[in-house]
Every structure is written in structure tokens, then in C-alpha cells.
Amino acid sequence: MRKRIQLVLLSLVLTTACGWLAAQSSNASTPAQNSQTNSGQNQDTGQAQKDKPTDKDQGIPDAPSAVRPPQPAPETPLPQQQNPQDQVPQRPPALPANEAPPRQSPADQGGTAAPPPPVNVKTVPQGGATKNAPGAQEELFKIVTNVNQVLVPVTVKDESGHLVTGLLPKNFVVIEGGKRQTLNFFTSDPFALSAAIILDLGMKDVDVQKVNRTFPALEGVFSPFDELSIYSYSNAVSQLAGWGAVGQKLSETLEGLRGVSGRNNGPPVTSGPLGPQGPMVNNMPVDPSAPIVYTPAQESHVLNDAVLRAALDLAKRDRTRRKVIFIISDGREYRSDASYRDVLKVLLTNNIMVYAVGLGGSAIPGYNKLEKLHIPRFGYSDILPKYASATGGEVSTELTRNGIEDAYSRLIGDARNQYTLGYLTHETPSGSYRGIEVLVDRPSCKSSIRPCVNVYARDGYYPLPPERR
């Protein structure tokens, strides 16, 4: 009986062991069969399936065994971080020469999509950004400053007409509005000139021809640092040469004027045997039926217009230069569109001085004073002294060719070599005329009655308009 029980138990143990061995063999053959099946379906991925770890490698514990105790499940290893320097970039496969590379989207490249380009992209020209036009708000931040610095050129001569040199700031006194001004600028250095030369072609022909022969001397009194412009006038104003230094262009312009003629001598013929009514015999017309028409020549002498044209051009020149209008004329003014008052305001506003060589005078005593009288509706017989006196310039009346050439050198030299005084005015900002007076104390003067010097300076000025910054 005991032997039967032992045989039954032994058979049960053998049966259990055989089942366990069958299970183990079944689990071991499953990965190989799966690997063969996958390799048959896709040969390209066979190597990847071959390298795939088994279930045991994936951390699945073994089945329980009666002989061997169960082992703990292995811990899942953390993924290793690769060093960016150890990664070797892979080059894309080469493409045929006639095939363009395909476009790849940011998603295909495995990166983050780039942001879209900004809207309203403005190009900037080379050299800096484009300045936008100022708006209404920008106009509120502009500062308006008044130009309070006043410069006064002064010429000082002795009783013999020679320039007085060696004076100091303490020898000058400037009075504006009855108040003495404090000088903050003083110099006796010569200045480069911006000179507008005005030629009167409406003078008598004998005077015009006399001036034409003095052009070489006129050209020689200017330095290479000066700039000139030539104007002419009679019935109208013309600019013969633009602004430039002494050179070939100026010489050609003056050479072209040598053949210009003036007006005929004498008044127009309005009566007599050769008058407009035709020939006459015994004060009776030969043809009584012929109409009598009186057509005297209507001449103009637009000196004011010529000075205004030159003054407006000089106002645009550099302020560091001394601005001068040099007129060669007989001084007659008739039928200009601009008045003397308007022209003088432009001259005094821009600190322009007028120098002139007067021709056509007479050697008869007292005759020149009569010619300076202003007759209404007949213009001015000689307006040059008025311009020169108001602006601080000079007028030289000459009758001969040598006298004209000497006047060129003397007047231009006086314009260049002046004392320049500057002060800061304390008057309220306005556009009204401001009168000034310049007094000179010559140390060597011993007379208590006569000043011993002649002072040439403008009588006043109009302030410049306010500047916007």
C-alpha cells in the first residue's frame, strides 16, 4: 500500500516537471519564430528586429521554479544623454547636377518653425535713416530764438582821407536807442568780400566808353578769396555773370562789355525842322495833311531795381563774408518798381554796404549839389549818396579814366579793411528800425572843437527775423 502511494506521488512530480519544462521550451522558441516571421515580411528591417532585445532583456521576470528561488526584476536603465560635440553631422546624399534640391519644411527638419517676417519692412538708404516730415506735435517742440547780436563795420579816416589804424575797443562807443552798448566783439582784420558789381549802361555813351577801358583795373582790385557777380541795368536789370572768384569767366564777361554803347548825347528831338511832324519850311509843314505825332523816347533808369536784385542775391551768401554792392553809375533813378525805402530796408537787414563811383558830374561849382535834388515825378538825379550814407559806404565822383581806376582801389580797400564792432542788443524783439551812432575817440587828437576823424558807419539797422531751431 505504501509503495502505491509513493509511485503516485513520484508520477505527479514527474508530470509537473515535464509540464514545466514544456513551458520553458515554448517561451524560448517564441522570439525566434517572431524574428523569422518578421524577416520574411520585410527584409530591410530584419537587422533592426535581430537587434531587438528579448523579453528577458526587457525586464520580465522568470517563471517560478521549485529548484531556483525567484530573482528580483532588474531596474530600467535611464537613457544616456549624448554630448553635442560627440554628434557627427550627417551629410545629405549628393544630387544630380540637373536636379534642384527639394524644399524641406521646418517640421521635416525636426526643428521649430521660424517666425514669420515682420510686416511693413522699410528699407534704409545708404548713409542713414530717412527723415520723416515733421508733424504737428514736432512743431510744438521747436524753439524760436531771436538774433540779438549786432555787427557794425566802421571805417575811420583822418582829415586827409587816409585810414586811421591802431585803434582799440576802448576808443569806440556805440549808442543804440540812447543807451551805450557793451562791446563783446572787436577786430581790425580784413574780410573776404562778396561783391555785386552794378554797371549803368544807360549813361551817356562817352561815360560808358570811359568805364569800359577801366575793366582791367577793376578786376585787379579783388583778391582770389573774394566772390563777384556782375549786373547791368538801363531800362531793365540783367545778371551778366553768376557768383564766382576772379578768373577766366569774369575776364570774358568784362571783355564782352567793352563793345557796349550808352545812350546818345542830348535830349530827344520833339520839334523843329527835323521833328516828328515832318520837314518844315518857314515854320510850315511841307505836307499840311500829314498827322503830327509826338513820340518822345520813354527812357527808364531803374537803379533801385538793380540794387534790390543784387541785395537779394547777397542776402543768400555766407555771413562770414563782408557784403558789398559796388555801383558804377551817374546816379540817376527813374521809373523803378522798387522804392528807395523798400530797398534800404533790405540793405540794412542784411548788413550790406553800398560803394559807388559817380560819373557824369560837372566841374561847375554848385552844379553837383543841384543834381542831388529830388523833383517829384522826375525821379532822383543822383541817389548814390543816399544809399552810401545810410549803409556806411562811400561815393567817389570822378571825371577821368585815371581817377576812376584810383577810385576802384581806394573804395574796395576801404570796404575790406574796416573795424568790426559787435554787441548784444537788449531791445525788445521787433521788426522796427533801430538807430545807432558810432563815436570814435582818437588819442592823438588835440582839438576840442573838431573830431579829427571821419567815421563811416550805417545809421541803423533792421533786426533779422527770428530763427527756428
Image (cartoon, helix red, strand yellow):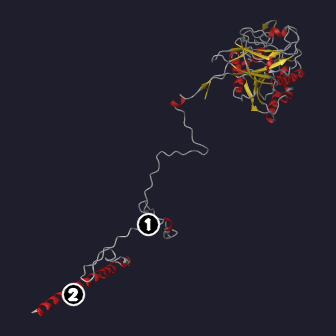
Asked whether the viewer can see residue 199, the reply is: no
Residue 99 place in picture, x, y as percent: 49, 67
Q: Residue at x 60, y 46 (%)?
A: 126
Q: Secondary structure at mark 1?
A: loop
Q: Which of these two is toward me, 260 or 393?
A: 393
Residue 121 place in picture, x, y as percent: 50, 46
Q: Residue at x 71, y 23 (%)?
A: 311
Relative placement, left or right, of 235 versus 8 is: right
Closer to us: mark 2 or mark 1? 2
Q: Check residue 371 in the rendering and tell me which mark sits there, or answer none.
A: none
Q: Is residue 172 above or below residue 221?
A: above
The amino acid type, in three-letter code, at marker 1 is Gln
Residue denoted by label 1: 81
Asked whether the viewer can see residue 150, the reply is: yes
Residue 177 place in picture, x, y as percent: 69, 12
Q: Residue at x 53, y 28 (%)?
A: 140
Residue denoted by label 2: 18
Q: Which of these two is toward me, 438 or 287?
A: 438
Q: Secondary structure at mark 2?
A: helix
Q: Is residue 207 above or below residue 377?
A: below
Q: Tag count in the figure?
A: 2
Q: Quadrant of the N terminus?
A: bottom left
Q: Which one is earlier in the sequence, the residue at label 2 or at label 1? A: 2
**C-alpha span from label 2 to label 1:** 47 Å
Q: Quadrant of the C terminus?
A: top right
